[in-house]
Amino acid sequence: MSPTSGTWTIGPMDSGDVRLRSGSHGLMNLDVRAPVRSGRLIIDAQTATLDLVIALDRISTGSFFTEQAARAMLAGYRVHDLVYSGTGPWQGSAFAISGQAQAGTMDVTMALAITPPVTAMTIELTGSASFGSVHIPFPGIGAVDDFMVDVDARLEVTAV
């Protein structure tokens, strides 16, 4: 059964959990929270479109040292937001959305599974993307060859 068509906004809140981790460097595993700046989900028949802006300049890690390293890395790339725009079809129990995620000079394809709002006014996002090699200005870390971004979020939405 496909979900109901409609348009929902995703407002600024701290409910989006974005986990950053490196794929090949065991020393740098970060659990990062980044709030959503804005977003919109449009469902039309069997297709969904998601536009989402995550405020990377407001990340928190729970650890002073890792938070400073993450913020220094983002500042080095002149990154304030992660901007995502994707579209995809309904596949059983979720939409399989693929689109571009841009953060500063980095631009990667990101695939997300989106569970649409049914009875509760929340959506669930899961997915990942590889940003390749990045430099982390933190003693003993330097460059990370395979920097991954895993997304796991439950976001409140408001019908438009």
Image (cartoon, rainbow, N blue to C red):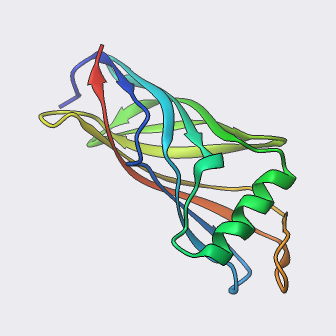
- Residue at the image point whose x is 59% and y is 42% from the top: 55
State the residue at coordinates (40%, 30%): 11
Q: Position of residue 98 (x, y in %)?
A: 56, 37
Q: Horizontally, is 51 left or right of 1 in the view?
A: right
Count the marks. 0
- Relative image position of residue 124 (x, y in whole percent): 33, 46
Residue 143, by quadrant, is: bottom right
Q: Is residue 140 above or below residue 73?
A: below
Position of residue 93 in the picture relative to residue 24 (left or right): left
- Toward which corner of the image does residue 134 lie, by quadrant? bottom right
Q: Name the residue at 62% across, 74% down.
A: 64
Place residue 114 in its image quadrant: top left
Q: In which quadrant is the C terminus drawn?
A: top left
Q: Residue at x 35, y 32 (%)?
A: 90
Indicate the quadrant containing the N terminus: top left, top right, bottom left or bottom right.
top left
Residue 42 appears left or right of 129: left
